[in-house]
Image (cartoon, grey):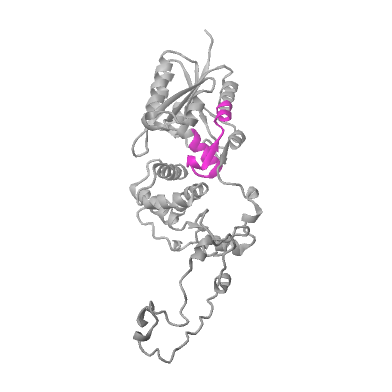
Amino acid sequence: MRSYCAIYVDVGYLLAAAATRVTGTSLRRGVQVDHAELIESLIKRAEEDSGLPLLRVNWYDSGGRPGGMPDFTQDEIGLLPRVKLRLGRLSHAGEQKGVDLRIGLDLATHGRNRVVDVIYLVSGDDDLTEAVEEAQGHGVQVLILAVPGQDGRAHGVSRHLQRAADAMVLLDGETIDQVVRSRAIPTELVPDEYKPSDEEAVAAAVEGTDEQPPEGVDQPADADGEPAAVPDGEATGETPDAPADPVRPDADTDDDAAPGTPPSDEVEPVGATPGPSPSIFAKRKATTVVPPPEPVWTSSTGLLGHGTYTQSEADPELVDAVARQVVLSWCATATPEDLGTLKAQRPSIPPDLDRALLMDLATRSDHYDLAEGTRHELRNRFWELIDQVRLT
């Protein structure tokens, strides 16, 4: 009987680890993935390491549609040669259900039946340790196929799982960088007219104080299609001098006022600053989500102006760095409408963002059982940074 190897892919781990390598956070929505090339790189690495032909890639993920049904991307992945789609489901709270159980059952069953001789497990989940040992008990080798971080070490693999596995094999980091890319537009690809020309433009964008429309944006037009006239005060940012009201000799009382004139106590005094006119708001519409500015730290007080961290067991700088990286990655693809929806859900954090926050802090602090105080401070810091996000 011919010997084979097989690959069991925990997609949640694979894409979260790859996203962390590329963007600095495990938020999956922050990256775009060439799944066909990624799977091909997994197959190539397993066959080279084992010297055996591949039997199958088992692709474990939660179904993107209700009831655990595959979404369009998952459907396309399931049509790839030698790929078996194994889907769990998402709960109403957005939590992944049934995926780890499917991986564990398949490892134990396939090991018992000696379906293959070598299994490559792409995961870092400590909960799979017992299933790995069950497969090994039936004479199957189980190796961890891990994603390397920027430091060249395996990302997010529990030590317990590492001890149970027969060996650990790393994927090629350069290949990961080629097939998993950030969704943010690289600076060199941004059109010149949208690039800030100097430091003042950058500061204005961050502070949200730039009131002038970008160069090349059409001015509002009137009903005849001609550019609408903008008063001198609006064009220059200065308040024009209001003309003095002519005084009629017979206008001594409110009774002598012209028809339709409001009572004297409601008339705006001469020289008062007028409110913003509709033409100001017609000049531009917010289309870009701008991340919060960098923090200010001191050795004695920590993070200035952002609350205190009295209950957290984690370093406040690390808490800030993790929350900030998740917010930056989210801002890279978010729209003004997304920002409004996110704030409307407060204090609830969407499940994918909350998972990214907790996973990133656990990985970077090397403490996978985060204290409740630490979780509280991390989520608080997330909302503080969201409150600093601006629209331009």
Vertical side of 274 occupied by 78: above or below:
above
Which residues lie in the magenta part? 14-40
Vertical side of 336 occupied by 176: above or below:
above
Front residue of this view, candidates 364 and 2: 2
Q: Is residue 46 left or right of residue 111?
A: right
Q: Answer yes or no: is residue 250 visible.
A: yes
> Which of the 4 quarters of the picture holds residue 125?
top left
| Main secondary structure of the magenta stretch | helix
Residue 22 part of the magenta-drawn span: yes
Q: Residue at x 37, y 38 (%)?
A: 94
Front residue of this view, candidates 339 and 43: 339
Q: Answer yes or no: is residue 313 visible.
A: no
Residue 270 part of the magenta-drawn span: no
Q: Is residue 175 left or right of residue 89?
A: right
Q: Position of residue 206 (x, y in %)?
A: 53, 60
Number of numbered labels in the structure image: 0
Q: Residue at x 41, y 50 (%)?
A: 342
Single out the residue that lies furthest toward the top: 1
Q: Position of residue 18 (x, y in %)?
A: 53, 37
Q: Is residue 71 left or right of residue 202?
A: left
Vertical side of 220 occupied by 118: above or below:
above
Q: Position of residue 105 (x, y in %)?
A: 38, 22
Q: Position of residue 324 (x, y in %)?
A: 48, 52
Front residue of this view, candidates 24 and 212: 212
Single out the residue that lies furthest toward the bottom: 249
Front residue of this view, candidates 268 and 254: 254
